[in-house]
Amino acid sequence: MSWPFWACARASGPELQGPRAAQVAAAVFPSCERVRLLNTGSEATQAAIRLARTCSGRDKVLRFEGHFHGMHESIWFNHSMVSKVDDHGEVETNPDSVGFPIHAKDGVVNVVFNDVEAFEHALKKYKDQIVCVILEPISYNCGCLESRGDYLRAVREICTRENIVLIFDEVVSGLRMRPGSAQKYYGVLLHLTVMAKAIGGGMSIAAFGGKKGIMEHLNPIGKAAVSGTYSGALIPVLASVACLTMASEEGFYDRIEDTGNKLFAGIDGLLAKHNIAGHVRGLGARFGIYFGVENPEDDFDFRKVAAVQDKTTYKKFLTECVKNGLWYP
Ligand SMILES: Cc1ncc(COP(=O)(O)O)c(C=O)c1O
């Protein structure tokens, strides 16, 4: 953007910029007809879950082990730990922080990712109790944990069959990998999309969106209340319009992908040269280094990676990065 932000705002009217950002976001994310702006990813997942609850009398949220959706009490469970799992793939729910209300975990069901049978089993067990399913279509919070084969399509079909709202948390994957983000890459249209981070290019902005029918349950038309003092603040909104527009330009992702692939191959080459077990898995502008993981098939399984991951080397790598001025995480 060659104009300063304030000049753009004055030229086209600041009050029109919020709707414009929402419109551009809707054009970039195929599942969205309407978009509501907020400030952080945590707020946006919280609002999306509330909106889902508005659409039915059900209560529980089904989430997947390892995935991260923000720091609020309705969802921050089982992100950074491996908990007990039963024979059907249901994982004991454990909070990622102390200080949660005692009953918060009753609102959540945790299941292993990439396992259709485990998903079906949980839905049968909690029949008519699950209001929504939330997931990272590519869990960059677990390194670069992609969904396997037709898994996401199966999840979509099952949610439709069971009348469950499906939420893709594209806070990290959104705008960072391909045109249309993960939902287009996997060819899965869903009820609600959450976006943040890259849509503001470093500014504090987040959003969630979906089809008109579901979004109309939001205030002021509907009864689901969502608001915030800084929601739709001008400077982040202008940054977002610029980022979303840039991401729509022809060839934008070719360069990202090309740079990423060179970087991934370079790191893989160094690991091999120095006889360090492990590899890189990346997609778009984000990747994970899987120290100690020798079989790339294991990357699809949070538990397998956690079991074989070489934490000592990873820690050493992080420490050396910081010493050399690279804040890797
Ligand atoms: C996938 C995902 N969802 C939600 C969030 C929460 O976003 P925020 O930190 O902006 O609240 C994050 C943050 O890293 C995230 O990675």
Image: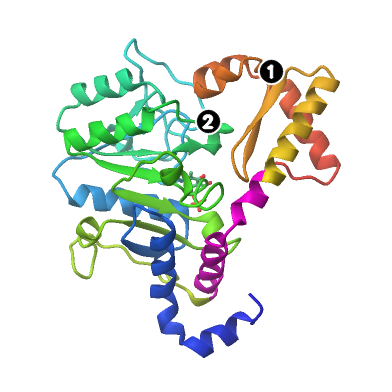
Judge the density around disc 1: few (<14), some (14-19), many (≥20) Cα neighbours within 10 Å. Answer: some
Q: Is residue 97 visible to the viewer in this orientation of the structure? A: no
Q: Nearer the viewer, residue 34 or 189?
A: 189
Q: Position of residue 32 (x, y in %)?
A: 34, 57
Callout 2: 10 Å neighbours few (<14), some, many (20+)?
A: many
Classify residue 175 as left or right of residue 218. Answer: right
Please name the residue shown 67% across and 51% down the image.
255
- Check disc 1 and report the residue beneath it: 292
Residue at image point 50% right, 52% down: 179
Q: Residue furthest front?
A: 250
Q: Is residue 278 left or right of residue 80?
A: right
Circle 2 is placed at which residue position?
145
Q: Relative to 281, say whether 36 is above or below.
A: below
Q: How many marks?
A: 2
- The amino acid beneath tag 1 is Gly
Mark drawn on residue 183: none
Label pair 2/1, CB-CB below 8 angstroms: no
